[in-house]
Amino acid sequence: MSENYPQGHFCWTELCSSDWQGGKTFYSDLFTWSAEDQPIGNGLYYTMLKKPQGDVAAMYQMPADQHAQGVPSYWLSYIAVDDVDAMADKAKSLGATIVHGPHDVPEAGRMVLLCDPVGAMVALWQGQGHKGASVQNEVDTPCWFELATRDIESSTSFYSELLGWRAELKAMEGMDYTLLKAGDTMVGGMVAMDEQWPDDIPPHWMIYFSVNDCDAQAEQAKKLGGEVCVQPMDVPEVGRFCVLTDPQGAVFSIINLNQ
């Protein structure tokens, strides 16, 4: 196994889908991923989504009880840590709610799912047999992770104390954006949810996938049954992005970064 991601770096992304087969078809066609189904019992599968270089992300069928409760399909981000049990205890002491775990994932690692103090879901991962993604920051792979929060100060404090992230404010057109660094490495960002955000959208971590052509990819997503939530737009000095919803309701973003 190759070396684990450094603590505080995003290492994995995972889709919980209300229609596993439909979701698999959508993303395989949108990002030209291949899919490798791994049996996990009771006729269910954990599907590795792959490029030739290796694993990119994964997906699985939403449990029947969650589906019956109307839980929407969702993408989940994982952050690498050195000791998941210690970090789970620390997160709880800082105001997070432990949703599930910590628990072992056989032959892969150990994880905990938590809800941070502002209400955003995120997972912590201690790799043992599987470090996470084999490839990131390339076309059709995750390239950015962004927290939408209604309390920038609380979110900054929580992640800084938990993971040692440093926050840097960057003035952008019409808004201030918070960059997040683990050591000298930029690992993500934060955007404030102001009054323009609908009340029914909860705080969340958004995953951005890199693409060559944002507009063309958005049109392809629509042809495959997805929807465009935020039309393609330019971010000065960054690139062109849009926000999409897959046919099962999971939200994600694509971005054509400036080179």
Image (tube, grey):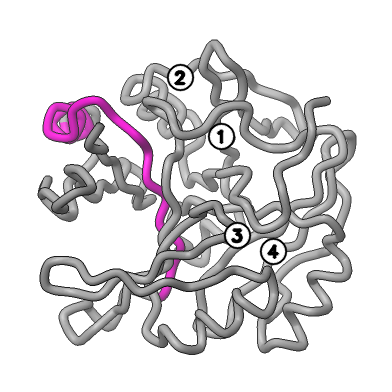
Q: Is residue 225 visible?
A: no
Q: Answer yes or no: do the residues labelled 2 and 4 have beta carbons within 8 Å?
A: no
Magenta residues, start to end: 203-222
Q: Amino acid at mark 1?
A: Ala
Q: Earlier in the sequence, mark 1 or mark 3?
A: 1
Frontmost of labels 1 and 3 is: 3
Assess whether residue 156 is covered by the magenta stretch.
no
Q: Are marks 2 and 1 in contact (CB under 8 Å)?
A: yes
- Residue on which the image places disc 1: 57
Q: Is residue 125 above or below residue 204?
A: above
* Label 1 environment density (alpha carbons within 10 Å; few <14, some 14–19, many ≥20): many
In the picture, the disc for residue 182 is 3
Q: Earlier in the sequence, mark 2 or mark 1?
A: 2
Residue type marked 3: Ala
Farthest residue to the top: give it: 52
Front in this rendered view, residue 63 or 3: 3
As helix, strand or loop, the secondary structure at mark 1 comes to strand
For image coordinates 23% across by 47% down, the residue present is: 238
In the image, residue 98 sits, relative to residue 111, either above or below, namely below
Query: Relative to residue 137, is residue 116 drawn left or right?
Result: right
Residue placed at 54% from the left, 11% from the top?
Answer: 52
**Residues marked 4 and 3 touching at CB (< 8 Å):** no
Asked if one can make out residue 113 in the rendered structure from this viewpoint, the answer is yes
Which numbered disc covers residue 113?
A: 4
Residue matched to label 2? 33
- In the rendered image, residue 212, in percent from the top left (x then y), is placed at 24, 25
Q: Residue at x 48, y 29 (%)?
A: 21
